[in-house]
Amino acid sequence: MREISENTRSAIGIACQIAGGLSLAFAGLYGWNDFSWRTAALVTAGVLFLAVEPILARLYRARVAGLEHRDRALNALTELCHSLLELPKECELRVTLLRVEDGTDPPRLQAVTRAPDGRLPQLTMYIHQGVAGHCYRKGESAVTDEVKEFVTEMVALGFTKEQARTFKPTKTYLCVPVKNARREVIAVISCDSVLPGVFTPERVTIAEKLTPFFARLLTTPESQEVKRG
């Protein structure tokens, strides 16, 4: 079922209210005293039309509440991942959740949440770019222990020089795939540090153990509606 926007929902509600009012008006025109099948049908139609708008409004509010709850949970999980990796403050660790958006060709990796500061990158990233793109294509965790020539290595990973120069220079990356029940990669957890060699096998395992929880939140009915919409 595709997502119904707020404007569409409002338009449907107004149309149903008008149709409901007209149905009841015609019912009155045919006469309440002589309550024929035609009058009964018009009354029934009027009541049903008038009931549509509040039902749509309630469903819309429930859906919005569900998405807000999901987003808060994703933020909390990202913060938890940041805390559990237990890197020293001087590493300036960032943990970013990148959701796969397959409505474009090629699919893109859309930043959803980031810890600890919540400031999302402005650049649109695709699945052929970066360590995260490599992780997506291989379907397995990827670690880059030390980036020595930052711009050069970013260009080798699919970015332009202009794009690479806008990034915060980092020394090491850890990217972990998030998979759905069909084993398809639906997101990537991307971690980076300004100090090299900090993503040990133990820390890789910690991040990997969190992926089922991310997957559960990203495959809720509300999430799937937004993705298709």
Image: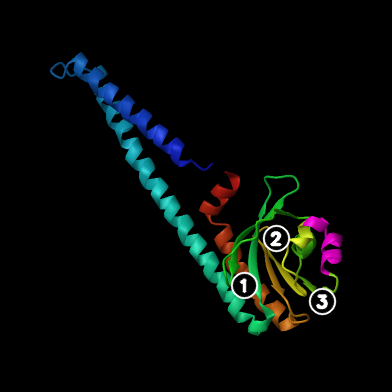
Residue 117 in percent (x, y) is at: 57, 70
Q: Which residue is mark 1?
A: 210
* Tag in front: 3 or 1: 3
Disc 1 secondary structure class = helix
Q: Specify whether residue 16 is painted magenta.
A: no
Whether residue 159 is visible here, answered yes or no, is: no
Q: Looking at the image, what colour scheme do you see?
A: rainbow
Q: Which residue is mark 2?
A: 183
Residue type, label 1: Leu
Q: Which residue is mark 3?
A: 146
Q: Specify whether residue 158 is painted magenta.
A: yes
Q: Residue 115 vs residue 34: left or right? A: right
Q: Residue 197 vs residue 9: left or right? A: right
Disc 3 secondary structure class = loop
Residue 143 is tagged as none
Confirm or deny contact between disc 2 and disc 3 (CB under 8 A): no
Residue type, label 2: Arg
Dividing the picture into quadrants, the one containing residue 172 is bottom right
Q: Which contiguous range is marked in magenta?
A: 150-162
Dividing the picture into quadrants, the one containing residue 183 is bottom right
User: Which mark is first along the chain, 1 or 2?
Assistant: 2
User: Which mark is first along the chain, 1 or 3?
Assistant: 3
Whether residue 16 is visible here, answered yes or no, is: yes
Considering depth in this image, is 168 or 42 the residue closer to the camera? 168
Confirm or deny contact between disc 3 and disc 1 (CB under 8 A): no
Tell me: residue 4, above or below residue 157: above
